[in-house]
Image: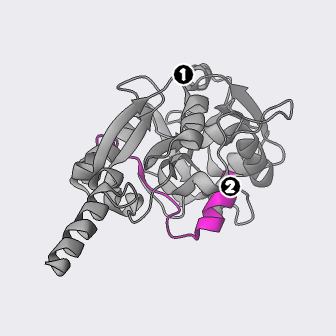
């Protein structure tokens, strides 16, 4: 009888303990952007991959609100954050969307950037990219913009980098002949992308950026996402995602695992 009583007490303790109960195994995901967009799809792959471990979808207004939620919640929670959320503010103030290292889990996925040009532009050669006074259109972004400039300075000090607020603006400039090259994540109709900022040649690229200039910084760079999370113990969320049917059958096939062969510290430095 005494042994039976002890067993009952132990069972009740296990059932009521919040740290090891079934509810604690559930992992919430944060959505901080409009439904249906790329950010939303990236976190949907996570939610679908979690299966029975998925808890709730927490909808917040923006990436800053997502960070505040991670700081305050006591529940296991994960978010898919875009690299540009780590951009330094121009005035030196703290970026409300940037995470502390303790919330950084692992790199998620990226679509590599490429150096592209109009396919019918005979002057847009690799030799011109390296030596001529070419004009290169890039995205005017607080995170990627400075990296594009440093990359091009190493490739060709004579090149002039022209920032644009939106990709469609530098695509129009390519058509008009205002720029010779652009740095994009995907080629549109009538464009070719001979150089890819990746560790291997992908798509229609002829070479990697490191092949073009081994000493160029940011020669591996993509429009990227990373996992951020809080209170997650005993669950390898990245491994769960990458082994899931949700990831295998993802809509965004040009996004693939990124920098996951590096240590967590080296991955973290890539965000800085």
Question: Is residue 253 visible in this depiction of the protein?
Answer: no
Residue 263: give its label.
none
88 shown above or below 65: below
> In screen coordinates, is 242 left or right of 81?
left
Residue at (36% x, 58% y) in the render: 17
Cα separation, mark 1 vs mark 2, equals 23 Å
Q: Nearer the viewer, residue 155 or 144?
A: 144
Residue at (27% x, 55% y) in the render: 22
Residue at (83% x, 43% y) in the render: 158
The location of residue 271, given as percent across then percent down, is 66, 52
75 shown above or below 180: below
Q: Residue furthest right?
A: 91
Q: Which residue is label 1 attached to? A: 168
Q: Give the crowd class for mark 2: few <14, some 14-19, many >=20 residues within 10 Å.
A: many
Which stretch appears magenta?
250-271
120 shown above or below 266: above
Q: Earlier in the sequence, mark 1 or mark 2?
A: 1
Q: Nearer the viewer, residue 249 or 220?
A: 249
- Number of marks drawn: 2
Residue 218: give its label.
2
State if disc 2 and disc 1 touch (CB < 8 Å).
no
> In screen coordinates, is 118 left or right of 245?
right
* Quadrant containing the N terminus in the rendered view: bottom left
129 shown above or below 260: above
The location of residue 42, given as percent across then percent down, is 39, 41
The location of residue 164, given as percent across then percent down, is 67, 24
> In screen coordinates, is 204 left or right of 222?
left
Question: Is residue 64 visible in this depiction of the protein?
Answer: yes
């Amino acid at each position: 009888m005494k042994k039976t009583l002890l067993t009952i007490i132990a069972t009740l303790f296990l059932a009521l303990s919040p740290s090891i109960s079934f509810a604690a195994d559930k992992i919430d995901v944060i959505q901080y952007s409009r439904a249906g967009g790329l950010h939303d799809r990236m976190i949907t792959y996570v939610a679908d991959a979690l299966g029975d471990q998925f808890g709730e979808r927490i909808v917040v207004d923006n990436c800053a609100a997502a960070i505040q939620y991670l700081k305050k919640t006591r529940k296991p929670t994960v978010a898919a954050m875009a690299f540009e959320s780590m951009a330094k503010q121009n005035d030196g103030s703290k970026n409300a969307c940037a995470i502390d290292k303790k919330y950084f889990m692992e790199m998620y996925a990226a679509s590599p950037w490429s150096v592209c040009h109009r396919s019918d532009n005979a002057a847009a050669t690799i030799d011109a990219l390296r030596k001529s006074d070419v004009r290169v259109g890039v995205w005017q972004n607080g995170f990627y913009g400075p990296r594009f400039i440093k990359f091009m300075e190493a490739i060709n000090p004579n090149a002039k980098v022209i920032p644009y607020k939106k990709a469609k603006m530098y695509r129009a400039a390519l058509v008009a002949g205002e720029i010779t090259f652009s740095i994009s994540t995907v080629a549109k109709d009538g464009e070719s992308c001979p150089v890819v900022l990746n560790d291997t040649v992908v798509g229609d690229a002829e070479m990697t950026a490191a092949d073009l200039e081994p000493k160029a910084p940011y020669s591996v760079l993509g429009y990227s996402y990373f996992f951020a999370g809080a209170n997650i113990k005993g669950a390898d969320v990245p491994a769960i995602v990458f082994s899931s049917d949700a990831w295998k059958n993802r809509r965004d096939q040009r996004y693939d695992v990124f920098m996951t062969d590096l240590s967590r510290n080296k991955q973290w430095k890539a965000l800085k």
